[in-house]
Amino acid sequence: MRALVISGGGSKGAFAGGVAQYLMQELQCSYDLFIGTSTGSLLISHLALQKIEKIKKTYTSVNQESIFSNCPFTIQKKYGVHTIGINHWNVLRNFYRGRKTFGESHNLLKLIRNTLTREEFETLKNGPKEIVVTVSNLSLNQVEYKSINDYSYDEFCEWVWISCNYTPFMSLVRKNGCEYADGGLGNMVPIEEAVRRGAKEVDVIVLQTEVNHLNRLPSRNAFSLMTTMFEFMLDRIEMQNIKIGKFAANNNDAIINFYYTPTVLTTNSLVFDKEKMSAWWESGYNFAKYKNNEINQIDPEKGEVL
């Protein structure tokens, strides 16, 4: 069994889409299992359907309004760099309505339903491929994996949405008596789950550089500090997930092929810029092409470049 695992990473998911496009269209990789966390959850259904151009069009055209029904921050672009500030009015309005988060992301749920049709859902559910999304159950303090085989159309769309809800900036969802949030809070790179489900070869797209190349600028405001803190914690979680995944693969004779981003794409993955995301998609495609060409030029017996 071969699996494709895509990590969380917000707007950086466009890079993952480009990598997956090359693997599936040019290398003709066929996957039995697709597992995604957060932004990876948005990609996997369409990749399994082989509707890559459709999801590419969606990913390279979204903006803040496509995601947030109540955006908690302002975005300013100066000298090509995005900086965020607090949208005090929207945050106060959310608290006045009794919400527990700074912002709401119901527009994303609408986008998911508009992008994945009922017919496409039924095709996937009745097909041979398994689609799994990662969510964090805050009430039970555990990570859960939701397979398309176990849910109706509306339920599965909601689980995909929940997997992407980067609290406290996006919606906190109460479902089945529990509070759920972004799957990345518990498992950013669910390699272990792919191996547990029987995968013997796993292609893993990690939306982070393999080696830390980042020296963050000082925080400018409370929101900037919070996003920096969350990014720091998620980076630590990601590193642990990869170590656990490698351990699981070694103990189950599974092969892992990693695709990290070659450079730091952004320091704030909650900013959705059409121009940058279009460039990241192409960058992901070209990077996968370069990496596989480089591998193919090495003599496996001598370890020498041909």
Image: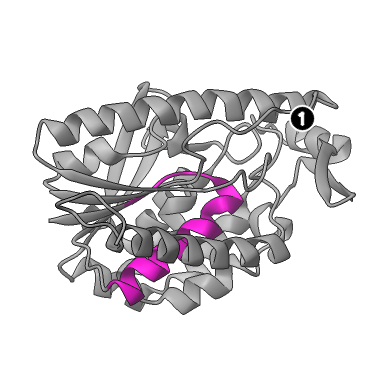
Inspect this view and state whether residue 49 appears.
Answer: no
Could you say which is closer to the camera, residue 186 or residue 4?
4
Residue 92 in picture, x, y percent from top left: 82, 33
Q: Quadrant of residue 103?
A: top right
101 vs 8: above or below: above
Q: Secondary structure at mark 1?
A: helix
Res 4 visible: yes
Q: Quadrant of the C terminus?
A: bottom left
Task: Locate the N terminus by quadrant.
Answer: bottom left
Q: Which residue is denoted by mark 1 in the rendering? A: 224
Q: Residue at x 74, y 37 (%)?
A: 94
> Is 178 on the left or on the right of 147, as rendered?
right
Q: Nearer the viewer, residue 193 or 79?
A: 79
Residue 118 coordinates in the image, percent (x, y): 37, 73
Q: Which residues are magenta?
A: 5-27
Q: Report the side of 33 relative to 84 (left or right).
A: left
Residue ranking furthest to the right: 78
Q: Amino acid at mark 1?
A: Ser
Which residue is at a point 35% across and 30% down the rendered structure image? 241
Task: Give the image location of residue 303, x and y in percent.
Answer: 23, 49
Residue 2 on image: x %, y %: 18, 56
Q: How is the image coloured?
A: one colour
Q: Is residue 11 magenta?
A: yes
